[in-house]
């Protein structure tokens, strides 16, 4: 996994060094800009995960840098944490109206800086990757959760969920009907997770018909897998999210080729991936296992 990248726009060397050292120790790659123009250029070329922006900068004030970043169609995704010695309410309002995502007054506690930076990046990545069909967090948010578990050396499990016969269904019934099925699975995943009386697992939508549910309690994941299968079968049987795939009619007197059989119905395909402490050293290794899980038989434990 690549380090999360920050641009620190601060003209005072002592403060810039302190901020960079603190956030560097927390695992961030820190890039320094000594004035507003350099900050704007770094944001354009590096597209960082966050901009730590001092208000009072030479060449271009931080508030103007903030406005220009947030007006840009691409750069506007970069969250901004404003640092300033001007702590009155009017300045805070002006900074937030310019598009700043958070505000920290000098002097500040380095621990608070660290926590605010992490919270802004976490929120940004979660919202940026949220799937438009299911409104669930996407790949980046899932990756952040997994990295945290691996770094803490905690055992966990991932439930890989997709829809069997989905591609054939989409080919036959079209994009809109396929999206309805995806939305149905997303809704069922949320409903079943919220119904749990224990700590709720984290949920993510990888894209298409692929979902991941993670928890440190693998017994909960097994329970969820069974509940999801039943809920999906009931929903499809009731006509929600489209119907099963019928055998296509003969076209121009030519039946479908026997080498391309058409599945009779949709069903959930659920595989549990176990991650005891030390099994996966990186997100990349786990991602490779999820690829294999997609090809594994329904109900398999890997």
Image (cartoon, rainbow, N blue to C red):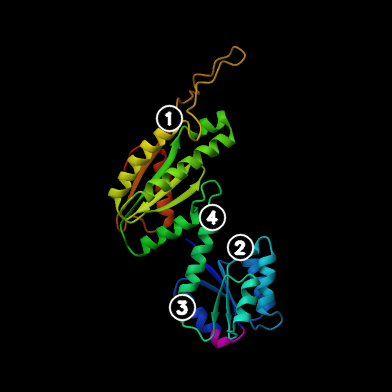
**Residue 267 position in % (x across, y down):** 42, 33
Q: Which residue is mark 2?
A: 77
- The alpha-carbon separation of the residues under discs 4 and 1 comes to 32 Å
**Residue 229 position in % (x across, y down):** 37, 37
Residue 279, picture quadrant: bottom left
Q: Give the residue at the far front of this rendering.
A: 89
Residue 102, picture quadrant: bottom right
Q: Which residue is mark 1?
A: 237
Q: Which residue is mark 4?
A: 129
The chief SS type of the magenta part is: helix
Range covered by the magenta-colored residues: 11-15
- The alpha-carbon separation of the residues under discs 1 and 3 comes to 52 Å
Number of the label disc, if any, that sits on residue 112: 3
Look at the image and tell me in which quarter the C terminus lies.
top left
Please tell me which residue lies in front, 17 or 10: 10
Q: Give the residue at the far top of this rendering.
A: 253
Earlier residue among tags 4 and 2: 2
Q: Nearer the viewer, mark 4 or mark 1?
A: 1
Please tell me which residue lies in front, 104 or 17: 104
Which type of secondary structure does the marked residue at label 4 adopt? loop
């Amino acid at each position: 996994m690549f380090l999360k990248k920050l641009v620190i726009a601060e003209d005072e060397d002592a403060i810039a060094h302190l901020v960079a050292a603190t956030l560097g120790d927390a695992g961030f790659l820190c890039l320094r800009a000594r004035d507003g123009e350099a900050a704007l250029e770094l944001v354009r070329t590096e597209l960082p995960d966050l901009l730590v922006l001092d208000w009072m900068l030479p060449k271009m004030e931080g508030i103007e840098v903030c406005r220009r970043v947030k007006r840009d169609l691409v750069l506007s995704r970069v969250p901004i944490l404003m640092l300033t010695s001007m702590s009155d309410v009017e300045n805070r309002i002006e900074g937030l109206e310019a598009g700043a995502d958070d505000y920290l007054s000098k002097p500040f506690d380095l621990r608070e800086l660290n926590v605010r930076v992490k919270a802004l990046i976490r929120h940004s990545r979660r919202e940026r990757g949220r799937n438009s069909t299911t409104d669930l967090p996407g790949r980046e948010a899932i990756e952040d959760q997994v990295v945290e578990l691996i770094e803490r050396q905690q055992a966990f499990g991932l439930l890989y969920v997709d829809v069997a016969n989905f591609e054939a269904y989409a080919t036959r019934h079209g994009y809109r009907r396929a999206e309805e099925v995806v939305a149905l699975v997303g809704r069922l995943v949320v409903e079943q997770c919220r119904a749990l009386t224990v700590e709720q697992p984290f949920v993510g939508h990888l894209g298409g018909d692929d979902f991941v549910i993670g928890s440190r309690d693998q017994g909960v994941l097994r329970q969820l897998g069974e509940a999801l299968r039943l809920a999906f079968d009931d929903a499809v049987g009731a006509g929600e999210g489209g119907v099963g795939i019928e055998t296509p009619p003969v076209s121009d007197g030519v039946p479908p080729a026997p080498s391309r059989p058409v599945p009779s119905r949709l069903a959930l395909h659920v595989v549990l991936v176990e991650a005891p402490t030390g099994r996966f050293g990186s997100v990349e290794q786990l991602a490779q296992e999820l690829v294999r899980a997609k090809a594994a038989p329904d109900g398999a434990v890997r």
